[in-house]
Image (tube, rainbow, N blue to C red):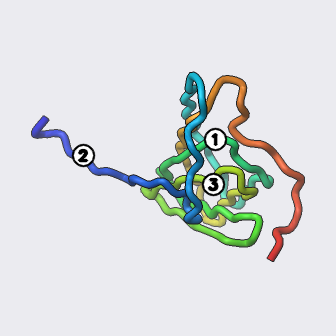
Amino acid sequence: MENVATTELFRTSQSWDGAPLPDYLQGRPELVAVKYVFPAGCKLGWHHHEVMNFGVLTQGELTIVAHDGTEKTIHEGETVVEMVGTIHHGENRGPRPAILYMFYLSQKGLPLAVQHQDEAPAR
């Protein structure tokens, strides 16, 4: 073990916007890991998550925009704890693809994201 380097990336009970994370779901968990590749200029539609999720950006930069206009840009090597129950979207404003690995704490049958109609954020 003496040759293994460890770095804690985060320890939190809040999403990136400072909102407290919800209590754990009841029942058997389903852990899901997803790799997302956002081409330069790509923008996801508005959505929200019903389950907690977090990730690490391994390439590029990604901006997360809450429906109220609040933004957070994460850069290569940074982590993010997503919002739960809050409408938002992600967009790659950078010049190269952004690669994001996300980890969901879910249950069988629950969607990872719930889509909403594309609309301008309330400001």
Q: CA distance from mark 1 to mark 2?
A: 27 Å
Q: What amino acid does circle 3 point to?
A: Met
Instruction: Tell me which label, 3 or 1, sits earlier in the chain.
Output: 1
Distance from disc 3 to disc 1, alpha carbons, whole Å, reads 9 Å
Amino acid type of the residue tagged 1 in the rendering:
Val
SS for dot 3? loop
Q: Height in image: 53 above or below 98? A: above
The vertical placement of 32 against 56, above or below, is above
Mark 1 residue crowding within 10 angstroms, few (<14) / some (14–19) / many (20+): many
Location of mark 1 (residue): 51
Q: Nearer the viewer, residue 79 or 21?
A: 21
Q: Are marks 3 and 2 in contact (CB under 8 Å)?
A: no
Mark number displayed over residue 22? none
Residue at (86%, 68%) from the top-left corner? 120
The answer to which quarter of the image holds residue 93 is bottom right
The residue carrying mark 2 is: 6
How packed mark 2 is, by other alpha carbons closer than 10 Å (few <14, some 14-19, many 20 or more), is few
120 lies above or below 23: below
Percent of width and height locating residue 83:
63, 54
Residue positioned most to the bottom? 123
Locate the N terminus and report the quarter of the image it occupies.
top left
Q: Quadrant of residue 97?
A: bottom right
Q: Up-down: is 83 above or below 50?
A: below
Kindly report the distance in space between the C-alpha atoms of the residues bearing marks 3 and 2: 27 Å
**Mark 3, residue position:** 83
Q: Is residue 84 left or right of residue 55?
A: right
